[in-house]
Image: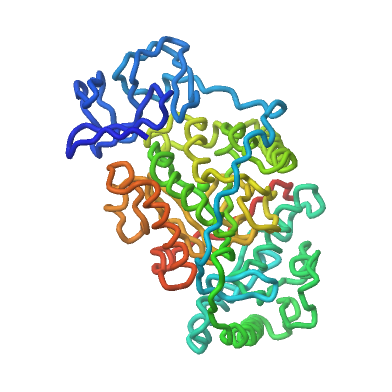
């Protein structure tokens, strides 16, 4: 990476030697007529994080960032111009039938030994980073009653059990009024099932059911999971109440207290860093995402993988245009083919709504200098670091083995977060350029800003400022190590993230591509 910098002088970042556009670093942008230290003179005002051309680009010429074509010029763009999204024609998505499969598998890096965190060991072999009572649901009908009960549990019972971190209601919109046997219904159903198995719930989740709904409690807790003991009192059905609302609340509170007592017996113990299951995503991205925050996450991912941990990245529409860079990195041809399958499934899913991956980019992304989904994807996949991709999960599936896993999810922040929780993540990291107060109730969320200006404006929401990379105050390597240690401290409960301190969390949001009746 080439960094042009003097104290307050005009600065830009060029990522790859092939690039013919660079990104302006200065907070207020640079006015027309600005001369950079290498002699480049701007012909327009160029805002921070937006692109400026290094050479004259003819009509139809390639615009190159990350060493890849992000668009074709619709008109001549002279050297020193601000490159705006409406001047570019987006390349077509890479065809899925001619991708390189497992052709450039990165060699395994040297193992990192001796790193640990303090976690809660579970009977199924996973480790929790928090000790949470989860109360899941089979249907939306029970939400009002459960929310009422959880409020009382938090006020009246939780203070008696100081080793339990929280009580979380896993409420959602699924369960009835749905085509429960439709092919894609498996996605929301397995998501609900696997959410209850998240390592941070300690294998002690309860189920609240109405009684007459399509999604039955046994299906949520039992299918394919022999470890669930059906003799345990893990279920309450509201329709079993013979004395109305008051009895429902009493019954739920009584059931909750049996679990709180068990969870309160648990203590943290020292476990290897390999027990970490990190879910990564971005939201409110800008053109800095791919220069600062995401490369730092990528460096930290490589460190975690060297320590034997599990790292998941997601967001199909944000890898689709860069998929050739991922299929080539797959450990085996089979893993590469699974990646292709998930891309194809999503292409078809979007096509049903007469949409495509270009619907992903938001007005905020564009204001942040991202011209289109191709540019956004190239910045997004940097999170995955440089290791071989060893596994692929469909939406709602639970992780099976350690390593670098592509977990196929929509890019929507809360849907992706929900699906990564179902996949088993016990820690989440989230990069943002435009800013979002995003959080999750079931796992700590580390928020990393792509720009220092955001970290300064939101000092009580952003945990780590990766904008230091753009201004030369930290290297990608330094920030990668900082993140690695921060992850372990947060996992151990030694450090709380801002979202945790404020108890900010988004709702569980299921991905249901199947019909509603
Ligand atoms: Ca997202």
* Most distant residue in the front direction: 110
The answer to whether residue 411 shows anywhere in this view is yes
* Most distant residue in the left direction: 8
Q: Nearer the viewer, residue 334 or 262?
A: 334
- 477 over 13 or under it: above or below: below
State which quarter of the image contains the N terminus. top left
Residue 237 image position (x, y, % from top left): 73, 76
From the viewer's perspective, tell me whether residue 399 is left or right of residue 439. Answer: right
Q: Where on the picture, by quarter, is residue 500?
A: bottom left
Q: Residue at x 44, y 27 (%)?
A: 65
Q: Nearer the viewer, residue 254 or 285?
A: 285
What is the total number of numbered labels drawn onto the structure image?
A: 0
From the viewer's perspective, tell me whether residue 321 is left or right of residue 399. Answer: left
Q: Residue at x 51, y 80 (%)?
A: 154
Q: Residue at x 56, y 72 (%)?
A: 271
Residue 270 image position (x, y, % from top left): 53, 76
Q: Residue at x 61, y 50 (%)?
A: 404
From the viewer's perspective, tell me whether residue 463 is left or right of residue 200. Answer: left
């Amino acid at each position: 990476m080439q960094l042009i910098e003097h104290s307050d002088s005009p600065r830009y970042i060029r990522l790859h030697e092939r690039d013919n556009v660079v990104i302006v670093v200065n907070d207020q942008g640079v006015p027309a007529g600005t001369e950079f230290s290498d002699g480049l003179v701007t012909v327009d005002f160029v805002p921070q994080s937006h692109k400026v051309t290094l050479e004259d680009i003819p009509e139809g010429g390639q615009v190159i960032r990350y060493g890849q074509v992000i668009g074709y010029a619709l008109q001549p763009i002279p050297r020193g111009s601000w490159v705006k999204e409406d001047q570019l024609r987006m390349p077509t998505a890479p065809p899925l039938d001619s991708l390189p499969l497992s052709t450039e598998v990165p060699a395994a890096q040297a193992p990192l030994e001796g790193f640990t965190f303090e976690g809660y060991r579970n009977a199924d072999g996973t480790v929790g980073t928090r000790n949470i009572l989860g109360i899941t649901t089979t249907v939306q009908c029970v939400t009002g009653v459960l929310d009422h009960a959880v409020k009382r549990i938090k006020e009246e019972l939780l203070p008696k059990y100081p080793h339990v971190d929280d009580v979380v209601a896993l409420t959602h919109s699924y369960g009835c009024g749905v085509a429960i046997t439709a092919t894609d219904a498996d996605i929301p159903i397995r998501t609900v099932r696997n959410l209850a198995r998240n390592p941070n719930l300690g294998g002690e989740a309860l189920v609240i059911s109405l009684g007459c709904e399509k999604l039955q409690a046994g299906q949520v807790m039992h299918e394919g999971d022999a470890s669930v003991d059906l003799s345990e009192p893990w279920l309450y059905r509201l329709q079993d109440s013979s004395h109305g609302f008051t009895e429902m609340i009493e019954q739920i509170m009584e059931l909750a207290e049996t679990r709180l007592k068990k969870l309160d017996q648990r203590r943290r113990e020292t476990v290897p860093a390999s027990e970490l299951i990190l879910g990564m995503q971005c939201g409110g991205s800008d053109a800095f995402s791919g220069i600062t925050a995401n490369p730092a996450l990528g460096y930290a991912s490589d460190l975690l993988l060297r320590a034997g941990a599990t790292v998941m990245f997601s967001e199909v529409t944000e890898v689709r245009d860069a998929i050739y860079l991922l299929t080539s990195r797959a450990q085996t041809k089979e893993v590469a083919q699974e990646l292709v399958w998930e891309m194809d499934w999503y292409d078809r899913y979007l096509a049903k709504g007469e949409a495509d991956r270009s619907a992903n980019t938001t007005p905020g992304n564009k204001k942040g200098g991202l011209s289109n989904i191709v540019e956004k994807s190239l910045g997004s996949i940097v999170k995955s670091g440089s290791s071989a991709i060893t596994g692929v999960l469909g939406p709602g599936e639970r992780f099976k083995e350690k390593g670098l896993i592509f977990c196929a999810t929509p890019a929507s922040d809360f849907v992706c977060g929900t699906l990564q929780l179902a996949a088993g993540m016990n820690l989440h990291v989230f990069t943002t350029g435009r800013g979002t107060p995003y959080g999750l109730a079931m796992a700590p969320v580390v928020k990393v800003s792509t720009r220092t200006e955001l970290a300064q404006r939101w000092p009580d929401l952003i945990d780590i400022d990766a904008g230091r990379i753009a201004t030369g105050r930290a290297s990608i390597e330094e920030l990668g190590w900082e993140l690695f240690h921060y992850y372990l401290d947060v996992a151990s409960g030694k450090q709380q993230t801002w979202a945790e301190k404020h108890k900010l969390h988004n709702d569980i949001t299921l991905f249901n591509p199947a019909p509603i009746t």
